[in-house]
Amino acid sequence: MRIRYIAVEGLPFIIFFALAVVIVWLTAGFYWAVLPLVLLFFCLFFFRDPERDYVFKENIVVSPADGVVMSVAEVYEGRFIKDKAVKISIFLSLFDVHVNRIPVSGKVVELKNEGGLFLPAYKKEAGDLNVRSYTVLETRWGKVVVAQITGLVARRIVNRAKVGDVFKTGERFGLIRFGSCTEVYLPCTARILVKEGQKVRGGETVIAEFCD
C-alpha cells in the first residue's frame, strides 16, 4: 500500500527533528546528527496515515485501529449502552499505524474523558484505569462506543470528533501516540468475525456485522 499522508499531529515532531538534523550536522558533523536523523525517520514512520477509503455495506463494522485483537468478551457496558455488549480490545504496538477510524456509520452523541494512569496498554485493567477517551455513536443498530486508551508510552489522545458529527464507516477521527489500546463496544446483536490474537487493520478489517 502506498503511503499518501502523514497525520497532521506528527508535523511538529517531524519539523523539530528535521531542524535538529540540519543544525547538528552543520555545527558538529554527520556523526552527531545520526540520533536526530533516526528520530526523524521514526516520527515519519509512526505518524504515517495510509489511505484506506473502502466502501462497505451499512451493516459492516470495521476495526477502529491497526493492531492485534487482545480479547473478545461479552460485558455489561454501564456508561453509555447500559446493557450487555461485546467488547473487542485491540493492542497497538509502536510499529502499528496509530490513526483511529470510525467502526460503523453513525452520529456522535456523546464524548467523555476518564482515568488518570498510564499502565501498559496490554494489561486488562488498563481499559478501566488508564487515561481514555470515549466516542459514542448512535447507529441504526443502537449505540456503538469506541474507547481510545493510553499506554505506558502513549500519553496523548487526539479525538477530532465533536458531538453532532456524522461519520461514515472507516473515516478517520483521531489517533493515539505512542503505543496504546483501542476498544469498541458493540450491541450483542452483532455477529463477531474476529478472534483473539488476530491481526487487524483500521478501516479495512471487518470485525463484525449486523443482520438487517
Image: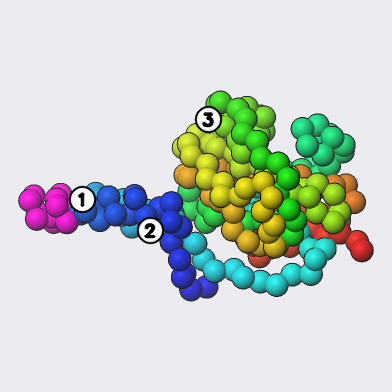
Q: Which residue type carries mark 2?
A: Leu
Q: Which mark is residue 159?
A: none
The residue at which mark 1 appears reads as 20
Q: Under tag 2, what secondary structure? A: helix
State the residue at coordinates (82%, 39%): 81
Of the two numbered discs 1 and 3 on the same chain, state the one appearing first in sequence: 1
State the residue at coordinates (51%, 66%): 50
Mark 2 burial class by Cα count in 10 Å: few <14, some 14-19, many 20+? some
The residue at which mark 2 appears reads as 44
User: Which one is nearer the viewer's eye here, 7 or 47?
Assistant: 7
User: Mark 1 and mark 3: span between their CA atoms?
Assistant: 29 Å
Q: Which residue type carries mark 3?
A: Phe
User: Mark 3 and mark 2: span between their CA atoms?
Assistant: 24 Å
Magenta span: chief secondary structure: helix
Picture coordinates of residue 99, whole percent (x, y)? 54, 55
Picture coordinates of residue 188, whole percent (x, y)? 88, 47
User: Mark 1 and mark 2: span between their CA atoms?
Assistant: 15 Å
